[in-house]
Image (tube, rainbow, N blue to C red):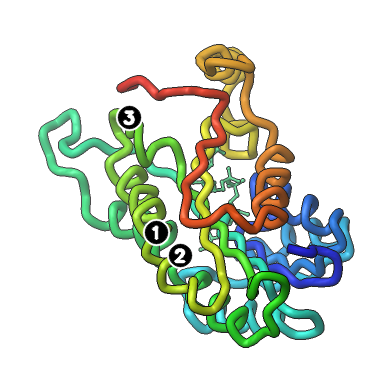
């Protein structure tokens, strides 16, 4: 896909993997719309690279529609990247024997799964309206899973369920959207050096880095952005989940 002059929407674009994706796409001449509930962060990242931003919540359909509409105005919307999401720790039964509470499980599914569904469906609808390019291609959707979809650790019940859903949506979404020339990919990151992990003490971060097969360090967010750009460029990539993890396989804990 030719990237220069097209439009993209990146959820969670105010921080971490999303912000790195905003920078990588903007660097290729893409007109990016940063969609994040953190308005100040979205404004900062957008300002840094000359992008637009929309403050809103991916779990609110109206906010998602407003962000997609903004992204689709001015240049053909061809790329949607879903990075908004978060983790949660909780076991099936707690140490005191009480069951995992439903509200946190529902919160994680709503943010990570429903949020991705909202933006994927609305963005696909807008991308489908654009003129097709080479090969009849109209666009690309990239959703963010996690290695926890496959190697869920102790305490990752809710998080792994949500990321498993992202993996599970990849093939049917790609099949649904083939008719309008939209590819669907997912990236399953391992351990990335984002604000999420920056909160950990340095020795713990080092130990996490050492647990990676090779290279023995945390992932650099820019490498996530590079992968999105590579996926956009290579029109034969479709309906696949790519682990971006330095070969790590997470142990039970
Ligand atoms: N960092 C890692 O090691 C890692 C590993 C595997 C998967 N992931 C996944 O990658 C994605 C991004 O993670 P990150 O590390 O960049 O996190 P991050 O916390 O740095 O960024 C997440 C962004 O999402 C935004 N956000 C959260 N809830 C939102 C909502 N309801 N509406 C709109 N925006 C919202 C936040 O404001 C934030 O800017 C998440 O889905 C996460 O599960 C991260």
Element on which disc 3 rests: loop
| Residue 63 against residue 235 in the figure, above or below | below
Q: Position of residue 113 (x, y in %)?
A: 39, 60
Q: Left or right: 169 with respect to 142?
A: left
Instruction: Nearest to the eye among marks 2 and 3: give it.
Output: 2
Q: Quadrant of the N terminus?
A: bottom right
**Residue at mark 2 to residue at mark 3: CA–CA distance:** 28 Å
Which residue is at a point 56% across and 70% down the rendered structure image? 182
- Whichever of labels 3 and 1 marks the residue nearer the N terminus, that label is 3
On the image, numbered disc 1 is attached to which residue? Answer: 171
Do the numbered discs 1 and 2 sit on residues whose CB atoms are within 8 Å?
A: yes
Which residue is at a point 88% across and 56% down the rendered structure image? 48
**Residue at mark 1 to residue at mark 2: CA–CA distance:** 5 Å
On the image, numbered disc 3 is attached to which residue? Answer: 153
Q: Position of residue 37 (x, y in %)?
A: 60, 65
Q: Position of residue 141 (x, y in %)?
A: 57, 63
Do the numbered discs 3 and 1 sit on residues whose CB atoms are within 8 Å?
A: no
| Residue 24 against residue 198 in the figure, above or below | below
Q: Quadrant of residue 95?
A: top left
On the image, numbered disc 2 is attached to which residue? Answer: 174
Please rate how many residues cluster around mark 2, counting C-alpha atoms within 10 Å: few if below 14, some from 14 to 19, many from 20.
many
Q: Is residue 84 visible?
A: no
Q: Position of residue 90 (x, y in %)?
A: 29, 38
- In the current view of this chain or complex, which residue is farthest to the front? 135
Please rate how many residues cluster around mark 3, counting C-alpha atoms within 10 Å: few if below 14, some from 14 to 19, many from 20.
some
Which residue is at a point 64% across and 46% down the rendered structure image? 17
Q: Nearer the viewer, residue 107 or 22?
A: 22
């Amino acid at each position: 896909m030719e990237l220069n002059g097209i439009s993209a929407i990146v959820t969670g674009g105010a921080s971490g993997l999303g912000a790195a994706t905003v920078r990588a796409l903007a660097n290729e001449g893409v007109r990016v719309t940063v969609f994040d509930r953190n308005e100040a962060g979205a404004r900062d990242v957008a300002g840094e690279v000359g992008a637009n931003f929309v403050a809103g919540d991916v779990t609110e359909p109206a906010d998602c529609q407003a962000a997609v509409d903004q992204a689709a105005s001015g240049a053909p919307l061809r790329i949607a990247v879903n990075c908004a999401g978060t983790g949660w720790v909780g076991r099936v039964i707690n140490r005191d024997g009480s069951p995992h509470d439903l509200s946190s499980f529902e919160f994680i599914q709503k943010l990570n799964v429903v949020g991705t569904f909202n933006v994927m469906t609305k963005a696909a609808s807008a991308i489908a309206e654009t003129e097709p390019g080479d090969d009849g291609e109209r666009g690309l959707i990239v959703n963010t899973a996690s290695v926890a979809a496959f190697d869920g650790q102790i305490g990752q019940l809710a998080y792994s369920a949500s990321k498993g859903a992202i993996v599970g949506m990849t093939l049917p979404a790609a099949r649904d959207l083939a008719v309008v020339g939209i590819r669907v990919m997912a990236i399953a990151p391992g351990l990335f050096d984002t604000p999420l992990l920056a909160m950990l003490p340095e020795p713990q971060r080092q130990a996490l880095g050492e647990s990676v097969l090779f290279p023995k360090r945390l992932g650099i967010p820019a490498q996530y952005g590079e992968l999105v750009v590579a996926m956009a460029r290579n029109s034969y990539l479709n309906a696949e989940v790519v682990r971006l993890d330095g070969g790590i396989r997470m142990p039970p804990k």
